[in-house]
Image: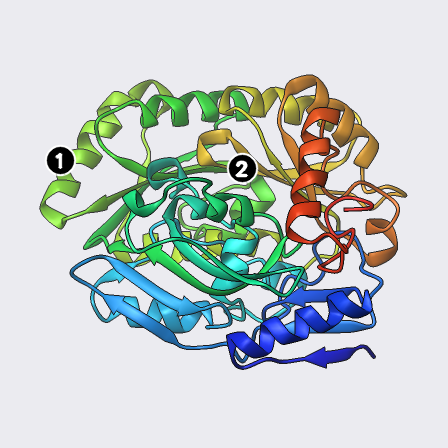
Amino acid sequence: MSDLIQPSEEKELAAAVADANSAQTPIEVMGAGSKRAVGRPLQTATSLTTEKLTGITLYEPTELVLSARAGTPLAEIEETLAENDQHLAFEPVDLGPMLGQDAGLGTIGAVFAANLSGSRRIQVGAARDHLLGIRAVSGRGEVFKSGGRVMKNVTGYDLCRGIAGSWGTLAVMSEVTMKVLPRAQSTRTLLFVGLTDEVAIEAMCAAIGTPFEVSGMVHLHGEFAARLVDSDILRRPGPVTALRLENFEPSLDYRCARLTESLAAFGKPAELDDAVSRDFWSNVRRLSFLQGSTDPVWRISTAPTNGAKLVAALARRLECRVAYDWSGGLIWLQAAPSADAGAAEVGRVVAETGGYATLIRADANLRGSVNVFQQLNPGVMALTRKLKESFDPAGILNPGRMYSGV
């Protein structure tokens, strides 16, 4: 078992990383560890967790801004925000349950380190778009900060965007400052049953083009749909397309009716009330449709209009089940077990169609033998290596987690 470093203050974190840098000792960087099984396996004798770097350090509800130490549980932050009818509008996905962990274990630092964004991304942007500022420790053990408490505070290089999505390979965040937003008073969901992938994406793209502020759009293949939708609605196995509308109750009747009229060519939808809608989208956020299995799971981002074409090309070679989010721009693909988890076919099809693929769930041996994060083109890869060398010249932070040698 590897040594575990648990700093409770930023200066302890900086000292630990500086010591590792001096000794040229690679370290595994993590929050609570709910996403340790994502990425290439690490060969490190030491692990560093931010679990004890906890606490909300600033919360100004009227200014819609919150700061917290990186190890603060996401659940704690969301509970605090809910007391003021506010939330993290980008709706961070909880990967833990899909990876065999309990729900709600993630930390706020890990949310931004992985740039985890949920269904509302199509309306409000990604996690990194809500990150106003960070304090972090580089691979040299040096503390640095970037950004501030408002969006226009960012001058020079926006390091927040570079660190977000780097999976702990560039720096260890000690504190994050984020934008928060008011929570919707009520939610409704329109459900279309039986649409093909191509037609469902056409419907979702049509919906996002209306003025009715659709805040979530998913399309689930039959077996996935059956795990989330009540059997009284889904009388027979089949795909489901869900469109979410939010805001004040008086406006929802009008907007649901008008959106239904606008999409009449796609059939008459069922309508889920507030309680059922919230439960449905909570399950989408926890990826409940992917739980209860150890089959490989790919996360593929692409242009919405390419989603159905990409899946059709993969389905000719791979046995797979699929859920689309982001109006078709995000694909969760569960593949049947195979020697390479379908990596060769996924890589080929994504390269031809356009997009980016990440192997989110697979055993360690398999993750060590295939490209977990899609290989970048030479120019982008060269830039990625330069960033790594700038932030972590000794290569001690999560070495090789995303790309071999980086």
In the image, which is nearer the foreground, mark 2 or mark 1? 1
x and y percent of residue 25 in the render?
Answer: 81, 67
Q: Nearer the viewer, residue 113 or 105?
A: 113
Residue 337 visible, this orientation: yes
Amino acid identity at mark 2: Gly
Q: Which disc number belongs to residue 238?
A: 2
**In the drawing, does residue 126 fall left or right of residue 33?**
left
x and y percent of residue 306 in the render?
Answer: 56, 20
**In the drawing, does residue 13 fall left or right of residue 210?**
right
**In the drawing, does residue 382 fall left or right of residue 69?**
right
Identify the image quadrant of the N terminus: bottom right
Contact between marks 2 and 1 (CB within 8 A): the answer is no
Disc 1 marks which residue? Answer: 254
| Residue in the picture at 88% in, 46% down | 369
| Residue in the picture at 68% in, 69% down | 18
Q: CA distance from mark 2 to mark 1?
A: 29 Å
| Residue in the picture at 48% in, 27% down | 195
Q: Indicate the secondary structure of the residue bearing disc 1.
A: helix
The earlier-in-sequence mark between 2 and 1 is 2
Rendered view: 19 above or below 264: below
Extreme residue toward the left, this view: 250
Q: Indicate the secondary structure of the residue bearing disc 2.
A: loop
Rendered view: 45 above or below 399: below
